[in-house]
Amino acid sequence: MKRKEFFVKINFPDRLKSLESLAYNLWWVYNNNAKDLFKMINPDLWRESDHNPIEVLLSLSELDIKKLEKDQVFLSRLDTVWNEYLEYLKTPKWFETVMNYEKHGGMQVAYFSAEYGLHESIQSYAGGLGILSGDHFKSASDLGIPFVAVGLLYRNGYFHQYLNSDGWQLETYPYNEFYKMPVTEAYIGDDPVVIEIPTYNGVIKAKVWLIHLGYSRLVMLDTDLDDNSPENRVITGKLYDGDSEMRIKQEIVLGIGGVRALKKLGIEATVFHINEGHPAFALLERVKDYMTDNNLNLSEAINMVKHSTLFTTHTPVPAGFDVFDNNTIYKHLSPIYGHTPLSVDEILKIGKVNPYNHNEIFSMAVCATKLSVFRNGVSKLHGKVSRQIFNNLWPEVGESFVPVGHVTNGIHLQTWLADEIKVLFNRYLGEDWYLRPYQRSVWDNVEDIPDLELYEAKNILRTRLVEFIRKRTIESIRKRGGSYSEIVKSNEILHPGVLTIGFARRFATYKRGYLLFTDEDRLSRILNNPKMPVQIIIAGKAHPKDSEGKDIIKKIHHIARKPEFRDKIVFVEDYDIQVAKYLVRGVDVWLNNPRRPMEASGTSGMKAAVNGALNFSILDGWWVEGYKGDNGWSIGAGEEYSDPKYQDFVEGQELYDKLENEIVPLFYSKDRSGLPRGWIHMVKRSIFVGCSEFSTNRMVMDYHEKYYVTLHEMCNELVDNNFSSLKEYMNFYGEIFNKWQKIRFIKSEVSSDKFYLGSNAKFTAEVYVDDLTPDYINVCVISDTNCPKLDFEEPRFIILDLVEQKDNVATFSKTIKLTCSGKIRFAFAIFPKHKYIFNEFENNLVVWEK
């Protein structure tokens, strides 16, 4: 039987058309007045639909619409919200006020990610990577950066979690009805936009959908079409589920399909930002396009792609990258590129550290690294870890010189801040604080917030959290058929006046969700202290195939059911954006205890910090930069262990010690007015540091200033005049590469009358340059001061000046002032010199003095 369907739309009267426009622009997700407007229409459905305005509007009958059209109170609020929305669009943004429009007016950033966490009603995310992508998307709009994101529109998305009576995690998958989501079909004229990708078993067709948020657009691809085979329809079904065959299909649609969608929509990006390795095939598609559309050779096309691409990695271990064997690559990419100038053999070389090793497998991260000129980790420590991971791509380079930088992650403040905290900001920081969250001076007045008002706000948020957890727990009990007595007892779990610790994250083993429970007797004494009680709320999902992670959840579930913990420890099922908002806003302490350095960044602690919670964490990820000594606590001092069991023991004991002797007593230490002044001081410091340093506005500005501007300028310059600058650069590189082995140091020296602070030191080097012009090279002194290790930690590059050239020998020299005392380690090195080389080590061409 062939089923058919059609969709009945609502033709809103003119007076209510703005209501529909608001629902389809995700600006509303962080505007309280807009959310209250939709809630006003049908409060029960608003709650039941996970705050979905599209579902609320679709529920309206003709009579309901006529009532709204005559409801003057509602219409007045609608006008207010609509004017706020127009004001958001009209207000000059950061990009407009700081950028040179003649030079950067044509900038277009294309951002690729496998998931986006935008709102609880849009199931297109699994965890932190998606939340980060969603917050990046929002801040790009707030800053006015020309930005288009690309992703997949999942029919089932990520799973919903529930625990059976034994505490074992089980999964169900939603069925996302796209007509109930704030997505619209993309059209060119009267025709829906559909892209095609040839495969070994027929053509994959993907429909293009759009999500709008302020100035930004999200292009999403959907393969659940009648024209596709059943096997291909489910490609955009579940997120991160299935074997490598399904994973490569998803990444082909995301990367290759994403580039084809942008091309079909007429979006010409000058900057490509690849978020993690999943979308790396997008870069191969761009290489092919430059070869076929612009008649570039392979080397030229690769360099064109490189010089307009940024690759961001979020992975702390090589095993976390997606890899595919040679046969899989041939099977899936041959139908796509078999009749193009880009051969699959060349593609395989791009995805390998050693391009001529037939036994090496294809790595998406290696592919993205080789096809980008800028790469970054997502915290300062993760930048260092990433340099270790990718060091094998630069074998002649020490770890500290590997060309991978870092931009520390952030959060979208307006999404994650509680209303009670926003009210305090409006009152004491000025009502325009959210327009300039990237200016540190905006946050200077956090200290002026009265202690009593901040304390009361936190009490309200904790009370709301407890109420939410009780309701959520009762719903879980009913779903699994629990008893009436369980439901009654659930109304008594937790207490709104008790110090509350939150622990919520993916239950991967390295995150050590079990660490807090390694000594149950001691934990019981801490939680059941009659004068200073403590309670714990835990949430998080294990991957469906991660039995070890599921086992940790099960053990915690059993511990929480013991009499001494029954009312003090709660595991909240189905951790999602909505649960996260209640948790980060309501807890007093945010606990995080991964194995260092396995936490690339982590953003949940940032969300807790800006809402006045104090982080208690291993010095890993963002907390290495965020911990100031008076805004939370550390576990350890940044040690890394070779013995995991010993590490668990040491850090577990410190966790208990600091809880028992520092954290809990400080929370309950109150003055005569009943206020814990010491605790409140730390809360204010937590808010100040979190808001001033860890917003996605600051993060996106960092990306823009460090990478986007340069990539945009390079892209335009290299394309101009029929790629004349690109071809000049390729000629330069060819000459350098052919003559590089002949370049060498003849001698070098450093001299000074006296090596005293404030005196001068002269560095001189004689270099054999063969017949290469000295303008093609930089002779540098790389120095570091008081570095305890043999390697350079914070190297300074001093470029020497050309003094003279005689025949094939050039002399370079530079005099500098000695501005610091102590040990100075230095080395002489020679690098290629060109305006399109932004990192000295990028091309693996370096001559060290021997």
Image: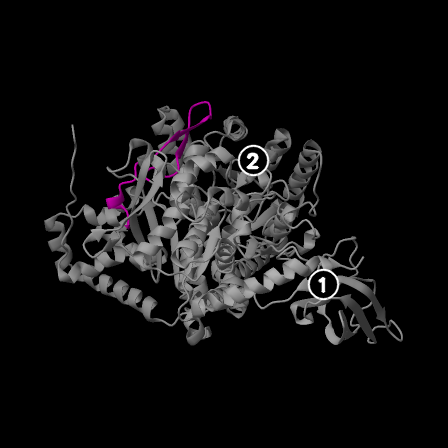
At 60% across and 50% down in the image, what residue appears?
A: 382
Magenta residue span:
155-183
**Residue extending furthest toward the right:** 754
* Along the line of sight, the residue nearer the viewer: 170 or 238: 238
Give the dominant element type of the magenta stretch: helix, strand or loop: loop
Mark nearer the viewer, 1 or 2: 1
User: Mark 2 highlights which residue?
Assistant: 513
- Residue 254 placement (x, y as % from top left): 39, 46
Is residue 329 visible in this depiction of the protein? Answer: yes
At 14% across and 62% down in the image, what residue appears?
A: 14
Quadrant of image for the C terminus: bottom right
Q: Total number of numbered labels? A: 2
- Residue 648 placement (x, y as % from top left): 66, 35
- Residue 86 placement (x, y as % from top left): 29, 67
- Residue 490 placement (x, y as % from top left): 41, 32
Query: How many residues crowd mark 2 within 10 Å: few (<14), some (14–19), many (20+)?
Result: many
Residue 830 is labelled as: 1
At 41% across and 59% down in the image, what residue appears?
A: 294
Residue 255 is labelled as: none
* Along the line of sight, the residue nearer the viewer: 55 or 633: 55
Residue at mark 1 to residue at mark 2: CA–CA distance: 49 Å
**Dot 1 or dot 2, earlier in sequence:** 2
Name the element at disc 2: loop
